[in-house]
Image (cartoon, rainbow, N blue to C red):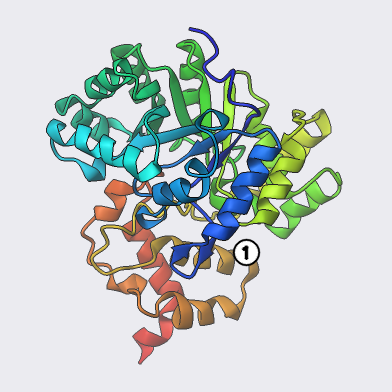
Amino acid sequence: MGNIFENAGKKLGFGCMRLPMNGEVVDTEEFSRMVDYFLENGFRYFDTAHMYVNGQSEGALKTCLTSRHPRESYLLTDKLSTAFFKTGEEIRPLFEKQLAACGVDYFDFYLMHAQNAEIYAKFKRCNAYETALKLKEEGKIRHFGISFHDKAAVLEEILNAYPQIEVVQIQFNYVDYEDPSVESRKCYEVCRKHGKPVIVMEPVRGGALANLPEKAAALLDELHAGSQASFAIRYAAGFDGIEMVLSGMSNMAQMQDNVSYMKDFHPLSEAEQKAIDGVRDIFHAQNLIPCTACRYCTDGCPKQIAIPDLFACMNAKKLYNSWNQDYYYNNVLTVGHGKASDCIRCGKCEKACPQHLEIRKLLEDVAAEFEKEDKED
């Protein structure tokens, strides 16, 4: 297999799960400026999915990218997500809908989305992999792959069953590298064993590694070598076989920062790696909820609980012990949304969570922290 990323430009990809927003809708003027800046600086890779930004991501790419730039000037990745089909017969119409939504005739990469043991079993029953490979034969997909959220043994099973897979997208960052629930290192090693190029998602762990605890931030600040996010993205990009690192950029400042150090990429130095090791130790000691704010959990919540926002509020309370978090919880995050105590324990959120978090138990913890007055009344 040749290098399927030889036309991908540089190693930074534009992840379109978190976009600039104007209220509840994508800010297409800002997004267009970001797209133009990205392309002007030699970057070409864009990543989306049908569910991203409450279903707006594909259409925003049509408005801001595909209708404004020549098809050969960018690479576009989309995904087959389990929430949008129940039978194999529904896959091809969904795929055609995605092409139309994005305004293209083919996808450069098409991934079986968020594969784990349970979702993979459904994809097998529906012959999803076979349908995607047929679409590749027809020229509607240039490269076929998977995005993956499970243990390394499951990834091994999938790659053994489908050697046609050309690329694997995994969660990979310096905090999760040895995490037993994510198994980033082990999954990376399985990819290397099978000779599959790797795309990295969540290199900044949903923004957590760009907003570090004060002691951890100080270790990086001493180096005067860039933003907190830059260390996380450069860490992931420095591994052999990692061909693309995605970043979900929601404003021009983030875009300009990422471009500044990835335009002429250099791996971490020995001193920078040592600092990262120290940050990892401090981060783990905080005992924070490892939510990446992908928001997959919120779509099916019958009580409309803004789960990632409540977890971020809980983490901030642990880090800063500020009464502001209590005010934010009661007067912003739960206005128009359910409180943590409103959870009916249906478990839909846990089935959707790529991090395999015990969300129901964690919501109990959140309620105990922020709803004390409610219980006392």
Which percent across, then down, holds residue 316?
58, 66
Which percent across, then down, holds residue 225?
83, 43
Q: In this view, does 367 lie above or below 300?
A: below
Q: In this view, does 164 lie above or below 318?
A: above
Q: In which quarter of the image is the C terminus?
A: bottom left
Counting labels gives 1
Q: Is residue 102 left or right of residue 343?
A: right
Of 350 and 142, which appears nearest the observer? 142
Q: In this view, does 272 lie to the left or right of 277?
A: right
Q: Can see residue 212? A: no
**What residue is at 23 percent from the left and 44 percent from the top?**
84
Secondary structure category for the residue under label 1? helix
Please name the amino acid that badge 1 sits on. Answer: Leu
**What residue is at 51 percent from the left and 63 percent from the top?**
21
Q: Can see residue 374? A: yes
Q: Is residue 55 above or below residue 245?
A: below
Of 109 and 189, which appears nearest the observer? 109
Of 4 and 351, which appears nearest the observer? 4
Q: Mark 1 points at which residue?
A: 319
Q: In this view, does 319 lie above or below 182?
A: below
Local crowd size for mark 1, using a 10 Å CA cut-off: few (<14), some (14–19), many (≥20) = some
Which percent across, then down, holds residue 301?
27, 62
**What residue is at 44 percent from the left and 25 percent from the top?**
168
Q: Name the quadrant containing residue 110.
A: top left
Of 78 and 325, which appears nearest the observer? 78
Q: Which residue lies furthest to the bottom in this view?
A: 377
